[in-house]
Image: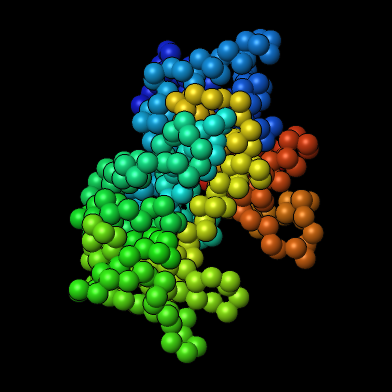
Amino acid sequence: MTSAYENPQGNSLRRVKTLAAMICGAIKTSKSYLHSLGSELPQDIDSESRVKNVKRWLTNKYTDYEVSFLPFIEPILESRISQNKEMVFAIDGSEAGQGCTVLMISLTIGNRAIPICWLVKKCKKGHLPAKMHLEVFTILHQLLNGYKKVVVLGDGEFDNGDVITACSDWEWRFVFRTAKNTKIYDGEEQYPIQSLKPQGNEKFMIAHDIAYTKDQHGPVNAIVWTERNWDNPLYLLSNFELSYTFAFYYRKRWSIETLFGDIKSRGFNIHKSKLTDYQRVAKLLIVICLAYILIFKLGNQEQNSPLISKITRKDRMDLSIFTIGKKLVKHCIKNAINIVFSFSKNCFISTV
């Protein structure tokens, strides 16, 4: 991990080592409790001292997002920018800690996602202010340094006018879900988006260059999307012109749901952490997201490993990359097999 820093020394090096130990504790125990994170600290100290060390890291002013997470995620973004690759981001909120909600933006990779940036607020899910949406998008915009080959996806609460205006100003593409009673304005006509109906066997109905809500934000394209097996249609706002395009991208929004599942019930149970302070929860996410990325990298690198037959049936190929990585870690711990974890290079299993 020290390769992400410029020759850390003294207290800085100690904080990096503590972070590495906490990541190992999260991976080994699959939990986000303080005593679980401290379980892999190398010092010969009692359980209470391990918890105190973890608390000290979570409250230290030098262990924030910019110092402790950004150095590991910047190379991923810079690599894609240098190759002029399109980047698709999804935004969503989820519970973390006790009584806190995290608003996170993730980068979609295949059917999975990598956490990029987030904000945490002391509130219940669904009660995040609209200005917080714009704030986290602004953080992403700063990270991308003006890069424009970007698509952003969001569920119903992210269709506010400030966010859509910002995305348009930054020349980003977007697809946001909206409510069925959202008022749209087509010239002098005003009607709810749910009044749009696909014709015959068509799946889509699009109204181009409309404004929406009483403030008449826009212009955007309003879309109604139906599928035979859906109980209700989806109502979307986008600056894509073609139906198959916004449908292709919006399906990728599900990746952040799987990410939350991986850092919660399928992975590290961050929603069961006893932390109540939103600032500490934000720093806890640094540890858990780095642990997630390492497991993801290991599963991706070793998905064709000969050890796969040791962790699942040969005829079963439906495991996610994260689940493969997690099962490989458990197998290697049980059988004393070395794992080489790295952010700057490939993670791999060493049988030497």
Report if residue 347 is visible in the image.
no
Q: Residue drawn at (52%, 58%), measured in percent from left and top?
A: 254
Res. 206 image quadrant: bottom left
Foreground residue among 281 and 55: 281
Residue 257 located left or right of residue 221: right
Please, which colouring scheme is shown? rainbow
Give me the residue at 70% from left, 63% from top: 317
Q: Is residue 315 above or below residue 112?
A: below
The answer to which quarter of the image holds residue 334 is top right
- Position of the C terminus by quadrant: top right
Q: Nearer the viewer, residue 82 or 129?
A: 129
Relative placement, left or right, of 46 versus 314 is left
Residue 265, image x and y in percent?
A: 66, 43
Foreground pick, 21 / 115:
115
Q: Position of residue 20 (x, y in %)?
A: 54, 27
Q: Nearer the viewer, residue 275 or 336?
A: 275
Q: Residue 211 appears at what percent x and percent y?
A: 25, 66
Circle count: 0
Residue at figure coordinates x 70%, y 45% from the top left: 328
Q: Is residue 125 left or right of residue 273?
A: left
Image coords of residue 92 (percent x, y): 46, 49
Q: Residue at left 47%, top 31%?
A: 122
Q: Residue 219, relative to residue 162: is it above or below?
A: below
Q: Is residue 187 depicted above or below 50 in this figure?
A: below
- Residue 131 in view of the camera: yes
